[in-house]
Image: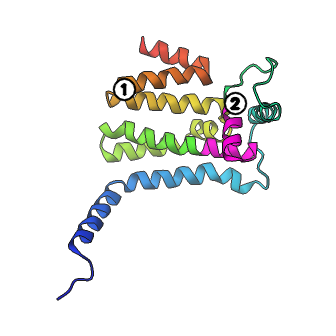
């Protein structure tokens, strides 16, 4: 009798099914994060960002693209707008969409990092902690309206992940990137390390 599925293919399907069941909590968390992060943009009828600070960042990013370089020192913090301008330039996206996509992807990546940082706990505690994280006003603010604080937050989670995995060289490289986007975050992390 011939089988419809080969033994090798059957073992691959079983391995995938085990992985999917094992990571079902992560899938649910990611889907919730996608829904929460996408909802404000789906409910609006234009691509403009939410919040005053993001408008400020967009103006600077547009100035950077228009002048083909960094603008004078009339702006205090240019790291986040420069990142937006770089993404907009590389992917040929409008500045508004580049910022929205950047914040969305940073939010999803932060959820995945947070979930992986909590691997030392059982799946129930990890799932509840991630639910609290995704539904928290801090998460919603950071990745919908937060702007310049979202990048250092992501790098801080990445730093914690590398430290827990005992990858100290990567943690050091990550630590170097945090002050580029927000010096206050670097000072706070430095105080926590001491």
Q: Which residues are magenta?
A: 83-104
User: Looking at the figure, which quarter contains the N terminus?
Assistant: bottom left
Q: Is residue 88 magenta?
A: yes
Q: Are marks 1 and 2 in contact (CB under 8 Å)?
A: no
Q: Give percent across and percent down for residue 29.
A: 46, 51
Quadrant position of residue 136: top right
User: Which residue carries the number 2 mark?
Assistant: 82
The x, y position of residue 156, in whole percent, is 49, 28
Furthest residue toward left = 1
* Residue in the picture at 47% in, 46% down: 131
Number of numbered discs: 2
Q: Quadrant of residue 121?
A: top left
Q: Which residue is mark 1?
A: 163
Q: Is residue 142 left or right of residue 169?
A: right
Q: Main secondary structure of the magenta part?
A: helix
Q: Is residue 118 above or below residue 184?
A: below
Q: Residue at x 58, y 35 (%)?
A: 138
Disc 1: CA contacts within 10 A as few (<14), some (14-19) or many (>=20): some
């Amino acid at each position: 009798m011939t089988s419809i599925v080969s033994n090798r293919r059957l073992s691959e399907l079983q391995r995938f099914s085990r992985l999917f069941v094992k990571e079902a909590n992560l899938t649910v968390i990611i889907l919730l994060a996608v829904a929460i992060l996408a909802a404000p943009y789906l409910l609006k009828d234009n691509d403009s960002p939410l919040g005053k600070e993001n408008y400020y960042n967009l103006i600077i990013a547009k100035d950077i693209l228009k002048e083909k370089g960094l603008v004078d020192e009339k702006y205090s913090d240019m790291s986040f707008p420069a990142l937006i301008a770089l993404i907009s330039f590389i992917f040929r996206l409008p500045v508004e969409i580049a910022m929205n996509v950047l914040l969305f992807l940073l939010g999803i990546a932060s959820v995945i990092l947070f979930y992986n940082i909590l691997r030392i706990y059982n799946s129930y505690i990890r799932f509840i902690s991630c639910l609290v994280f995704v539904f928290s006003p801090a998460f919603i603010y950071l990745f919908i309206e937060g702007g310049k604080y979202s990048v250092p937050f992501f790098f801080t989670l990445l730093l914690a992940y590398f430290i827990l995995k005992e990858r100290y060289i990567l943690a050091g490289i990550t630590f170097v990137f945090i002050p580029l986007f927000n010096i206050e975050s670097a000072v706070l992390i430095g105080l926590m390390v001491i």
